[in-house]
Amino acid sequence: QVQLVESGGGSVQPGGSLRLSCTASGDILTIKTMGWYHQAPGKQREFVASITSGGSINVADPLADRFTISRDNAKNTVYLQMNNLKAEDTGRYYCNTDVRALFDSGYGRFVFLPKGSWGQGTQVTVSS
């Protein structure tokens, strides 16, 4: 079993930046592609970004110019750098240990499904 601890959230003004961290412990050999999901108030969790153990990255298209993901395998930690934050970025951010990319022929694009363990999340509030 894997335990995840997310940190780095907080309250920022629009245009600000935050760096989220997610550190894994326990059965780390089961960790595969790690990723971040965002859950806005009253909405479902949505994919933000993922990164394989080899460093291949996917970022949700609307966020790609503001968010980046990185990973330190030696520390079992994945990071999410969020820049130029907007009010719609408010919500709880969750880390997942096994994000799988599947091609959705109906939408004609890849979807990223969380199949691994979740952390407790870290809250991000963007407000002036």
Image (cartoon, rainbow, N blue to C red):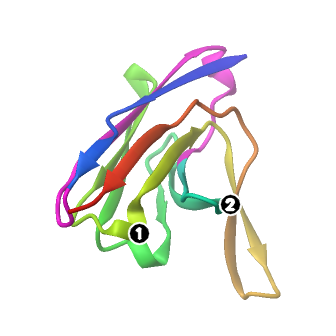
Question: Residue at label 1?
Answer: 88
**Who is closer to the viewer here, 38 or 55?**
38
Q: Quadrant of the N terminus?
A: top right
Question: Residue at label 2?
Answer: 44
* Element carrying mark 1: helix
- Residue located 32% across and 35% down the image: 8
Q: Residues within 10 Å of mark 1 (few under 14, many from 20)?
A: few
Q: Where does the image place residue 121, in percent across and percent down from the top left?
A: 52, 36
Q: Along the polypeptide, which appears first: circle 1 or circle 2?
A: 2
Circle 1: residue type:
Glu
Residue 21 magenta-highlighted: yes
* Element carrying mark 2: loop
Tell me which segment is drawn in magenta.
Answer: 13-35
Residue 70 magenta-highlighted: no
Q: Residues within 10 Å of mark 2 (few under 14, many from 20)?
A: few
**Who is closer to the viewer here, 53 or 1?**
1
Q: Are marks 1 and 2 in contact (CB under 8 Å)?
A: no
